[in-house]
Image (spheres, rainbow, N blue to C red):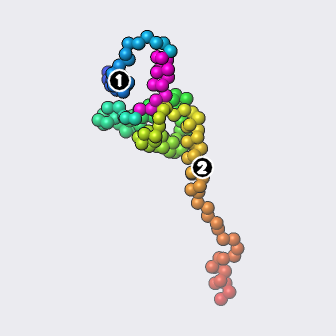
Amino acid sequence: MSDADLDEIRKARLAQLQQQQGGGTGGGSGTSGEGSQEEQRKHRAPNTLPRLLLTGTLTPAEARQAILNQILLPEAADRLGRIRLVKESRATDVENRLIMLARSGQLRQKVTEEQLKELLNAIVDNKETEKIIVSRRKGNWDDDEDLLDV
C-alpha cells in the first residue's frame, strides 16, 4: 500500500471516530480526561468495518489483517504471530474465531494476551475432544490360516 492509501485510511478512520464521539474532540483541555479517552480508544474494538473493507478495495488477506489489527492489542498480535510460527492451522483457527466474534459484535474491547490464551486453550480443548480413536483387534483373525487346514 502506498502512503496516499494509508493517509486515506487514517482520515476515514479519524472521521469515523469523530462521528462516533459526537462530532469532534470538543476543544477541552483536561489532560486527565484525554488520557482516559485515549486509553478507551486503544482498547475499544470497532463494531463496524472501515469503508475500504466494505467497498472491496482490499484483498481478502489485507482485509483479514486489517480486522485483526483493529481487534488485537500489540502483545496479543505478537503472541498470535508466534503461534503461527509453530502451528499455522491453529493460528488460523484462532483468527477465524476472533473475526467471527468481532463481526457478531461480541467483542467490546481489544483482545488482550490473556484473553487470547483463554481462546487458544478453548480451541485446543475442543480439538482434543474431536480425536478419533481406532481400536484394532488383537489375536489371530488372519483368513489365510483357514486355507491351510483344507
Residue shown at 55% from the left, 37% from the top: 116
Task: Determine if residue 115 is in view.
Answer: yes
Task: Determine if residue 99 is in view.
Answer: no
Q: Give coordinates of residue 8: x percent, y percent.
A: 32, 23
Residue range (magenta): 33-46
Q: How far apart are marks 2 and 1 (CA)?
A: 43 Å
Q: Which amino acid does label 2 sit on?
A: Asp
Q: Is residue 75 left or right of residue 138?
A: left
Reading the image, the residue beneath label 2 is 125
Q: Residue 122 carries which label?
A: none
Foreground tag (2 vs 1): 1
- Whether residue 150 is situated above or below residue 71 in the rendered picture: below
- Whether residue 143 is situated above or below residue 98 in the rendered picture: below
Specify the quadrant of the image occupied by residue 55.
top left
Reading the image, the residue beneath label 1 is 22
User: For numbered disc 1, what is the local secondary structure?
Assistant: loop
